[in-house]
Image: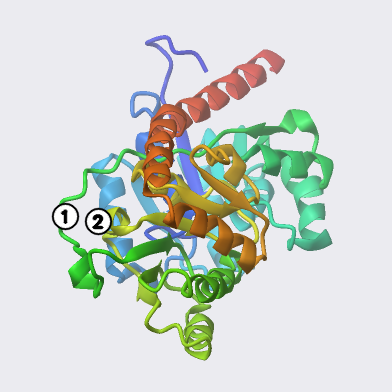
Amino acid sequence: MSRTPKARKLRHLTLVDRIGSFGGGERLAAEFSKRLSPERFDRILCATRWGPEVESRPTRAQAVDDLSEHGVRFVGLDRRHALGLRSWRELLLLMRRERIDVLHAHKFGSNLWAALLGPRAGVPLIVAHEHTWSFEGGAQRRFIDRQVIARRCDMVVAVSREDRRRLVELEGLPPERVVYIPNGIPAPPPPTGAVQRAGLGLHEDDLVVGTVGVLRPQKALDVLVKAAAILRGEFPSLRVLMVGAGPDYGTLEKLIDDLDLSNTVSMLGFRTDVPELLPIFDVAASSSDFEGSPLAVLEYMEAGLPVVSTRVGGVPDLVEDGVTGLLVDRGDPGALARAIAELLRDPDRRARMGHEARERRRREFDIDHTVERIEQLYEDLWRDKAGAG
């Protein structure tokens, strides 16, 4: 992919299921598309699950406007189920009509359809981006990753070293076809102070543990709720804030009630002002059973928060145990409670860890660094194809 002035722009298509949601993969797909060099790429983003009921949601409409402001053309397909043959035909025709040069898909479903449709559309360069390797994927997913996606895509991107290891060692993908590129986030604007503790029913001397994310089984938030039940005896002023919505909302609400934690654990639902909420936390917690490279953890780090997390997936790439946070085994409320208690007892240690976390995030996990590596990957693959031709 020559960088000479005579080189034409490459026609680039980002493929993802949806945008404008809490999901890290969807957010990153949009950020990559927006931040690719407009001098080198004509950019289109296609969201396949984009029916009228989705399009009308304010966060979705805002995401489309944001893409447009950055010069990215948006295409939405009304795919209602996994097969969605009509939508996939529309995608195939789109790629042929636009003569796409680079197809970059995000997450398993889009990766599969990129692998199946990209070659049929004559796309010369196809990249699959795996945002979370799940041990719950089963034999069928492992087979598809190995026999379809890895064979028909030019490269598979893993967001953590552990995900790359699993793709190679457990799924059998050729190591030369899997590359680790760490996630990054943009530097957020400084908080304005619009959200205050009193507005959330908190007292100034409350100790606040917070977590942000989609409320789904992967996040194992029942473990955090059970840890809160252990902690409240030592810390009567403890408050645990859960920010997010999702299928586990009702289950968690019932567990909080069963454990008589309604005065300790608060579910704040979906919020669009997360950067304003984070300064209220004293400690950020992540209790997930599995993760790729969670953006929420990077956001905690940028906010200067020490992170207590389960030692899963790419989290150890982000959180340096004992330096920027504490890591514990997954599925263990007692271990999570003990680690959180260590930090609640020691405000000076919290401050040191939070400072180190912010410095590390800015040094190693900035979105512009990630995009640079993505562009370099395209360049290397394009050059290899040109040389082979």
Kind of residue indicated by mark 2: Glu
Q: Is residue 144 visible?
A: yes
Q: Quadrant of residue 125?
A: top right
Residue designated by label 2: 276
Residue 303 vertical placement versus 205 (above, below): above
Residue at 56% in and 53% down: 309
How many C-alpha atoms fall within 10 Å of the one at disc 1: few (<14), some, or many (≥20)?
few
Q: Is residue 147 left or right of residue 217?
A: right
Decide which of 113, 237 is in the foreground and name it: 237
Residue at 47% in and 32% down: 370
Residue 34 vertical placement versus 74 (above, below): above
Residue designated by label 1: 193
- Find residue 311 and report its horizontal and vertical position in percent: 64, 50
How many C-alpha atoms fall within 10 Å of the one at disc 2: few (<14), some, or many (≥20)?
some
Q: CA distance from mark 1 to mark 2?
A: 7 Å
Specify the quadrant that holds the C terminus. Answer: top right
Residue at 21% in and 49% down: 191
Q: Are marks 1 and 2 in contact (CB under 8 Å)?
A: yes
Q: Is residue 34 left or right of residue 107?
A: left
Q: Quadrant of residue 82?
A: bottom right
- Which secondary structure, mark 1? loop
- Find residue 144 and report its horizontal and vertical position in percent: 77, 53
- Find residue 303 and report its horizontal and vertical position in percent: 33, 46
Kind of residue indicated by mark 1: Gly
Residue 363 vertical placement versus 84 (above, below): above
